[in-house]
Amino acid sequence: MSAVSDESELERLRRLVGPSERSYAELVADRDEAERVARDALAEAGDLRGHIRELNTQVSRARQDQDILQRRIEMTGWERTLDRAHQRWTLSVVPRLKRGR
C-alpha cells in the first residue's frame, strides 16, 4: 500500500470511529469550561437567594415597625407611656437581669 492510500484509509476510519485526538481535546476543554460556568452560575444563584432572604427579613422588620407605630398613633397618652415602659423593660432590663444570673 502506498502512503496516500494509508492516509486516506486512516481518515476513513476516523470518520467511522469518531473524533480525532485534537477534537477530543477541544471537547474536553469545552466540557471543563461548561462545568466552570455552571459552578459560577450556582454560586451566583446562592448569593441571590441569600440576598432575597435578607430583603425578606428587612421587609418583615419594617412591617413590624409600621404596625407598632400605627398602634401607638391610636393610643392615648397614658397607654403610650405604659407601652414604652413595657418595651424598655423587655428590651433593656430583662436581658441585664438574665446576664446577672
Image (tube, rainbow, N blue to C red):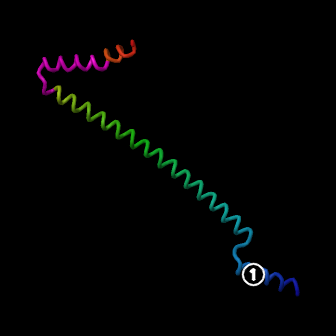
Locate residue 85, reporting x and y percent.
Answer: 22, 16
Would residue 80 be found to the left or right of residue 20 on screen?
Answer: left
Would residue 50 be found to the left or right of residue 40 on screen?
Answer: left
Locate residue 55, reporting x and y percent.
Answer: 36, 40
Q: Is residue 26 above or below residue 49?
A: below
Return the residue found at the far top. 100
Locate residue 91, reporting x and y percent.
Answer: 31, 20
Residue 89 sits in which quadrant? top left
Q: Residue at point 68% right, 65% down? A: 26
Residue tagged by mark 1?
Answer: 13
Residue 67 sits in which quadrant? top left
Residue closest to the eye, 92 or 52:
92
Q: Secondary structure at mark 1?
A: helix
Q: Residue at point 44% right, 42% down? A: 50
Q: Is residue 2 above or below residue 54?
A: below
Q: Quadrant of the N terminus?
A: bottom right
What type of secondary structure mainly makes up the magenta span? helix
Q: Is residue 27 magenta?
A: no
Locate residue 69, reporting x and y percent.
Answer: 21, 28
Residue closest to the eye, 8 or 53:
53
Q: Is residue 79 above or below residue 52?
A: above
Write down the region rendered in magenta: 73-91
Residue 99 sits in which quadrant? top left
Q: Quadrant of the C terminus?
A: top left
Q: Which residue type does callout 1 highlight?
A: Leu
Return the residue found at the far left. 76
